[in-house]
Amino acid sequence: MPFLLRVLLPDVPGSLGRVATAIGMAGGDIEAIEIVEKRDDGTVVDDVLLEVAEGTMPDSVVSACSGIDGVEVLWISRYPAGGSLVMDLEAVEALTSSPAEAYDKLVDLLPATFRVDWAVRLHRARGVVHATSAAPDDLEFVEIESPVRLEVPDDDVTLYAAARLDGNEVVVMGRQGGPEFADSEIARLGHLCGLAVTITTA
């Protein structure tokens, strides 16, 4: 069964190796690793896509990792079967392959790129103009100048992040239950939206 683990660890040689060993000892098999964020305090946040053997509890992986000095498990969740980590460069390649559809392709790629549950392109007057499955049918347009985390008072389960495409359109994505959007993820969302705008208008 596939799981996605987000872990905070010291940014020093050998840290990731110790985490990988602990995961293996607990019955997990690592499929992929992606650096989410390097922090100024000498730590790094990594996402680890792993397969857990049938009958193995994910708690055992969490306990094994948490037992390492300086390592903190921030979040673990089931991951869609057959899912893969999509890197930003792969997303850019997909956008440039069809410039006229770059906005919609961006929305389609966001769930895999950021491990979110859904994404939408939201127009000021027309509302949701393109969305992935599981996205809400109705979202209120937000006035933003730069990529941000959004507070949605009526929803205490989903975490929201958004970035502007132009004065009339924004992209919003939602992640249920965590983890919180890292600063680097907010910056990456803004960067990808900016690239989509450039590709579309080139």
Image: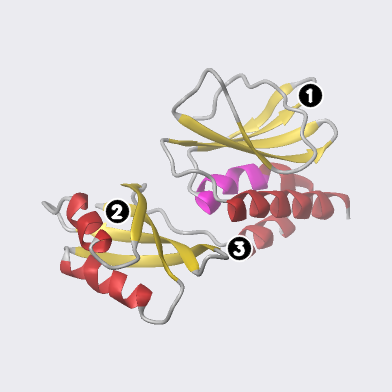
Quick one: label 3 or label 1, which is nearer the N terminus?
3
Q: State the residue lying farthest toward the right.
A: 202
Alpha carbon separation for disc pair 2 and 1: 38 Å
Could you say which disc has been placed on residue 98 in the image?
none
Please say which color scheme the image uses: secondary structure
Q: Report the front residue among 129 and 138.
A: 138
Amino acid type of the residue tagged 1 in the rendering: Arg
The kind of residue on which mark 3 rests is Glu
Q: Which mark is residue 124?
A: 1
Q: Earlier in the sequence, mark 2 or mark 3?
A: 2
How busy is the neighbourhood of tag 1: few (under 14 within 10 Å), some, or many (20 plus)?
Answer: some
Is residue 99 found left or right of 152 in the rendered image? Answer: right
Q: Is residue 62 magenta?
A: no
Q: In the rendered structure, which amino acid carries the disc numbered 2?
A: Pro
From the viewer's perspective, is residue 170 above or below residue 22?
Answer: above
Single out the mark in the foreground, 3 or 1: 1
Instruction: Specify which label sits upstream in the sequence, 2 or 1.
Output: 2
**Badge number at residue 90:** 3
Tell me if 194 is positioned left or right of 89 in this view: right
- As measured in the structure, the alpha-carbon distance from the residue carrying label 3 to the one carrying label 1 is 29 Å
Residue at figure coordinates x 81%, y 55% from the top left: 199
The relative height of residue 94 versus residue 9 in the rendered view (above or below) is: above
Q: Secondary structure at mark 2?
A: strand
Q: Are marks 3 and 1 in contact (CB under 8 Å)?
A: no
Question: How many residues crowd around disc 2 within 10 Å: few (fewer than 14), some, or many (20 or more)?
Answer: many
List the residue tagged with mark 2.
Answer: 2
Q: Is residue 149 visible?
A: yes
Is 52 above or below relative to 100? below
- Between the C-alphas of marks 2 and 3, the distance is 22 Å
